[in-house]
Image (cartoon, rainbow, N blue to C red):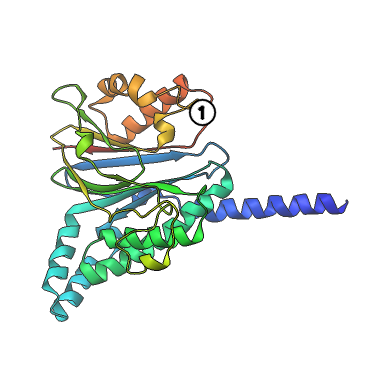
Amino acid sequence: MNRFQNSEQDVNRELLNFQQIARKINPRPGEIPFLNGIDIYGDTIPLKGEVGGDHLIYIDFNKRFDLDARIVEAQAKNKSRVARKLEEARHKAGILLADASGHSITDALLTAMLHQAFLVGAGYELSLFGEITVELFEALNSRFYQSSSIDKYITMLYGEIHESGQFRFISAAHPLPVVFSVEFNRLVNINQDRMVIFPPIGTLPSDSSVDAHRLKSSYGYKPKYSINTINIMGAGDIMLLFTDGFQDQDGGRLNFVKDCLEKCLREVKYQTARDIVEYLKQQFFTRIPKADDDVTLVVVKKIW
């Protein structure tokens, strides 16, 4: 065996090791949030291997954090607002979708970095504020701006669904949610002109950062993140979150959302969130047998 063969084996072992590490941070079935009146299910289908550039994180505040202990701690420190926000967290769940530029196995490194930084930051934010705020995403954006190149970036959507059906979210160059109304039997029009979409994570420093003057940028600065709100979900309504691989394939020439989604949802609108996801996956790969990007899809259904 020559030196080249040894080197190739070493690379393959390292890639396998990276896959195993990245696989561990993918959400498991038990991590899907449980909310009264809300049914949630999602899946990520990498283009190559078992991991790729797409990533999905669920935040079930009741499962992931000891809210009772945190509320007691906040009250002991006379942080009544923090305690109130923590109490409100019992009735909502967070969903983060991220999409790194590229879909190779090693592109998962960027989303793995985001995964760990986001969850660490979320814990601190709950202690400080009782909720996840836009300040966490400002910090993440600044960190990625300083540590990643302009051609390696992440689009991201983070939102929180409340038991009432209200969805509050920020989008960093990520596709906006789509909503299907059972009453009207069609996709409803969300006024996209009123939605604020920001640049991908890490491409521009924030002009609201206290360190902004030290972060030189040839392309300017992004404004501070603001939150979009959709009050859309009545009984039976379905909201879909997805990465752009679900929307555009074949260099943008195939658009499953525009061409097929409404018809498909009419056929399964009374099914569970999991059944809807599985049906959409089957229909997607029937129409697009040779995908050229990772695909992530989350269905949020209002039960009552």
Across and down, in percent, residue 28 comes to 41, 49
Give coordinates of residue 121: x percent, y percent.
35, 65
The answer to whether 233 is drawn above or below residue 280 in the figure is below
Q: What is the three-letter code of the residue carrying label 1?
A: Ala
Q: Is residue 105 left or right of residue 120?
A: right
Task: Establish if 280 lies above or below 170.
Answer: above
Nearest the camera: 210 or 60? 210
**SS at mark 1?**
loop
Q: Total marks drawn?
A: 1
Left or right position of 92 against 120: left
Q: Is residue 275 above or below residue 104?
A: above
Pick out the residue farthest to the bottom: 77
Q: Residue at x 16, y 47 (%)?
A: 163
Residue at x 12%, y 66% (from the top left corner): 84
Q: Position of residue 244 (x, y in %)?
A: 41, 35
Quadrant of the image for the C terminus? Answer: top left
Query: Quarter-wise, where is residue 240 in the image?
Result: top left
User: Relative to 257, is 230 on the left or the right?
Assistant: left
Q: Quadrant of residue 49?
A: top right
Q: Nearer the viewer, residue 259 or 28?
A: 259
Which residue is under mark 1?
Answer: 291
Estimate how packed mark 1 is, as few (under 14), some (14 to 19) or many (20 or more) residues with alpha carbons within 10 Å: some
Give the x, y percent position of residue 141.
Answer: 39, 58
Outermost residue toward the front in this view: 218
